[in-house]
Amino acid sequence: MTEYLLKEREKAILRFIIHQFILTANPVGSRNISKKYDIGLSPASIRNIMADLEELGYLDHPHTSAGRVPTDRGYRFYVDSLMDPPNLGNEFKSMVNVNLSQTPSETEDLLKITSTMLSNLTNQLALVSYPKFEQAVLERIQIVRLSSVRILVVVTVQSGLIRTITLEIDAEVFENNISTVQLFLNERLSGLKFSDIRSTLSERMKDFNSDLLRPIIRVFVDSVDKIFTDISSEKTIISGAKNILTQPEFENHEQFQSVIELIENKDVIIHILEKKISDDVDLNIIIGKENEDEKFSDYSVITKEYKVGDLKGTLGIMGPKRMDYSKIIAAVVYIAEQLTRELTKQR
């Protein structure tokens, strides 16, 4: 069956209805469109076009109102074909640049600032995942003695990111022993991917013969999954609950409760960030029932990848389908690009 092609006046009416609904959160009637927009059509003609758009699945008609609201299909057509080109004003760009450039150089601080800024700019829930370490390449390991039985392991990957972990050792640790083990580990492991280290570390350590240093080596072998693992699931930042709850959609107690439950379920949020419509694009816009999980049928999610060398993370927003898509897409894209730039400068 051939897809029906909307006529220009149908496109115009759909666009105006979505604009009005985004502004007011109220169903939009034909008289409202006739008064607000000078399109040379009577309310009766507009009403007929709205009825056609409803029949085609682009609009819905709430029982308690004479007006119409966009459907998921209507929003999708709007985002793909009708909305204004995404554009972020110079004032907002300057604010983003100043905030990111003044942030301390630690990656986590930068991601927290990014998340807060994205939520404040869009009035939606902001989501930022830590870069995935699964394909990270080890640059070096440093070991710091904290006490006679505790060490701090500092792992630096080639993208410049650092992670630290504290390990307990069941034997006394001496400073000169640490230096020897550190040198040995770097000789054997530098330049390898985390996934390769996890699968081969025990084999690579087999010919290490010093009984004196064996307890330190053993704790590395026993803790390999803990040290050389993907920590992105532990490092997902969610900001802006206060912002999103000011939206009219959450005056309803059930809706309010549902978004709180989503915020508290980080596994669900991680799944959203990892969801991609296509591998060919790094900007994803998922609207309503396009989300696999029914819990998200009332929400839209807009995400984009950012990069730190070969590593990638994701940032984005989640909010009611009634959102200013053009502005929010522009904000997500620009902030992801500037975050990439700042993280690259730190390398």
Image (spheres, grey):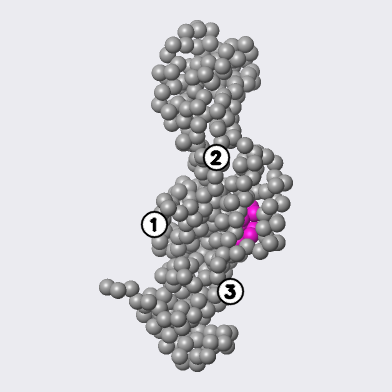
CA neighbours of label 2 inside 10 A, class few (<14), some (14 to 19), many (20+): some
Residue depicted at x 60% and y 21%: 143
Q: Is residue 292 left or right of residue 189?
A: left
Residue 343 in which image quadrant: top right
Mark 2 and mark 3 in contact? Answer it, CB < 8 Å. Answer: no
Residue depicted at x 57% and y 24%: 141
The answer to whether residue 106 is magenta is no
- Asked if 106 appears above or below 25 in the picture, the reply is above
Q: Determine if residue 347 is in view.
A: yes
> Where are the magenta residues, as a range?
116-122
Q: Is residue 57 left or right of residue 214?
A: left
Q: Position of residue 34 (x, y in %)?
A: 54, 88
Which residue carries the number 3 mark?
Answer: 23
Amino acid tagged 3: Leu
Residue depicted at x 46% and y 36%: 134
Which of disc 3 and disc 1 is earlier in sequence?
A: 3
Q: In the structure shown, which secondary structural element does the residue marked by tag 2 occupy?
A: loop
Q: Position of residue 157 (x, y in %)?
A: 55, 32
Q: Quadrant of the C terminus?
A: top right
Q: Position of residue 326 (x, y in %)?
A: 56, 66
Mark 2 and mark 1 in contact? Answer it, CB < 8 Å. Answer: no
Q: How would you classify the magenta stretch by its main secondary structure?
A: helix
Which numbered marker is on residue 271? none
Residue depicted at x 48% and y 67%: 79
- Closer-to-camera residue (99/224): 99
Which residue carries the number 1 mark?
Answer: 292
Per the model, the C-alpha gap separating discs 2 and 3 is 40 Å
Q: Nearer the viewer, mark 2 or mark 3?
A: 2
Q: How many marks?
A: 3
CA neighbours of label 1 inside 10 A, class few (<14), some (14 to 19), many (20+): few
